[in-house]
Amino acid sequence: MTSPTAGDREKVVSKLPSGLQQALKVRTAQHGIDIQHAVEAGITDWRGLGSNLDQVDTAGAKSFATFLPNGQWEAFRADCVARGVSIVQGLSQSVLVWLERNPAPGTVRPHTVRRLIVCNQKGGVGKTATAAGVGEAFAENPDQLHAVRVSKYYAALLEDDHAEPELQDLPGLGLRVLLVDFDPQCHLTQQLGHLPLAIDGDSLTKHMAGEAKGKLRDLIVHIEDERFGDRLDLLPACTDAFLLDVKLSGVRAREAALERALAPIEADYDVIIVDCPPSLGLSMDAAAYYGRRRPDEVTGNSGALIIVQAEDSSADAYDLLTSQIQDLRDDMNLELDYLGIIVNHYDARRGYIATSSLSNWMAIQNPRVIGVIGDLKEQKEAVRVKRPLLAYSPRCDQAVGMRALAREIA
Ligand SMILES: Nc1ncnc2c1ncn2[C@@H]1O[C@H](COP(=O)(O)OP(=O)(O)OP(=O)(O)O)[C@@H](O)[C@H]1O
Ligand SMILES: [Mg+2]
């Protein structure tokens, strides 16, 4: 069935098995093209084939509408008659032809493992929540579509407190991710439903101090969920990290201790995210050193993600953090890139303090604000049930924001 439309395409309504409709939706999103253009190409290729294809099972085909160039549908129907197949069969075969000729693009892996340091010495701002959420977003299934918030929302928020986020369905990023719980409080470990490592066994701290007996790899656990496949791992923390400064006192080049400890497992991952404790000092030095730009690395591949809140005390903490990072850069002669600022717990209903400090954060151009995350109940609920947020509530506002963030950093 066709009906005329403006322009050079006409609307076509037919039927297509729901499995093919879903595959078409995902694959076109993976290639960043419109469904109508894929169907058009599939029909063109199908019409050009010399022989009949195998029958496709079209039982339970569902209504399917698209737009095709004027005249293509009529010519296609005539071909279906000539080949002795139904329209639904011909259309299904055409879509299959397109799917076969346009396989899923492989995941684009970074040249150098990306090391993201999530930091701020101010406590409770959302470092752990962001480290987990962004890591989950990086690891989602590339063969499924996931709701992502369109990023221009942040700019719109400045104009209008009630700006409604727009969503877009995009394929997962499919990267192999390691979340490193670098905080003796062990929050990341516990929030993801795991136990801190036993105090008398091996730990990241012991590996950094050169006291470990086994391999670091043996401490890593999987975060189980179908949407992450086997791509999301966690290096749990141990409360012995409280002793990091003491244990490292006799170690040479202490700031490189984290890098040395993680070196053996780096090749297993595309992204390593370090959830820092709320403190400055040796742990922050070691994390900053780990996130520095390496000689073969492009700017912005690795670096620091700074989590703040839209309130005045966050600005003071930010000044302290950036001056420490500047000192580190100077003292150690390293480049640590800023990946951006994330304003968390944002709630415009808190009035002028919140809205004006959001404007102030937005006014900082380098690093720039790459995400604004609201104060949302789902985050707290996910922590309560010890599940990854993106698995617990995949379409909640914070989950769609975390996916936008991961793509903003990517
Ligand atoms: N956007 C949000 N909406 C609602 N609750 C949030 C949000 N972000 C974080 N939280 C909650 O706020 C608390 C503090 O967050 P989180 O642990 O991520 O902060 P942190 O900066 O890692 O803290 P610390 O400095 O102690 O490591 C947690 O209970 C967390 O679940
Ligand atoms: Mg934390």
Image (spheres, rainbow, N blue to C red):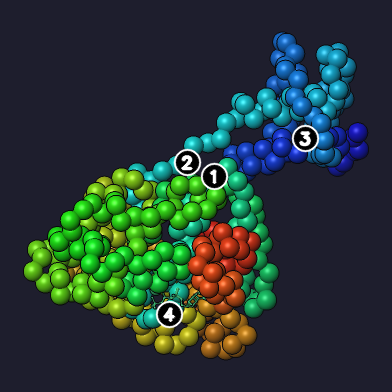
Q: Which residue is mark 3?
A: 17
Type of residue at label 2? Thr
Instruction: Out of 304 and 173, give the one closest to the viewer.
Output: 173
Q: Nearer the viewer, mark 2 or mark 3?
A: 3
- Does residue 395 lie above or below 88 as drawn? below
Label 1 amino acid?
Pro
The image quarter in which residue 76 lies: top right
Which of the marked residues, 4 or 3, is nearer the chain's N terminus? Answer: 3
Give yes or no for contact between labels 1 and 2 (Cβ–Cβ under 8 Å): yes
Separation of residues labelled 1 and 2 (CA atoms): 8 Å
Residue underneath mark 4? 124
Number of numbered callouts drawn: 4
The image's mark for residue 107 is: 2
- Residue 24's x, y, as percent? 68, 37
Mark 4 vs mark 3, CA separation in Å: 49 Å
From where the camera sits, is residue 244 visible?
yes
At label 2, counting other C-alpha atoms closer than 10 Å, the crowd grade (few under 14, some 14-19, many 20 or more) is few
Instruction: Give me the C-alpha separation between circle 4 and circle 2.
Output: 34 Å
Say which label, 4 or 1, has the lower sequence index.
4
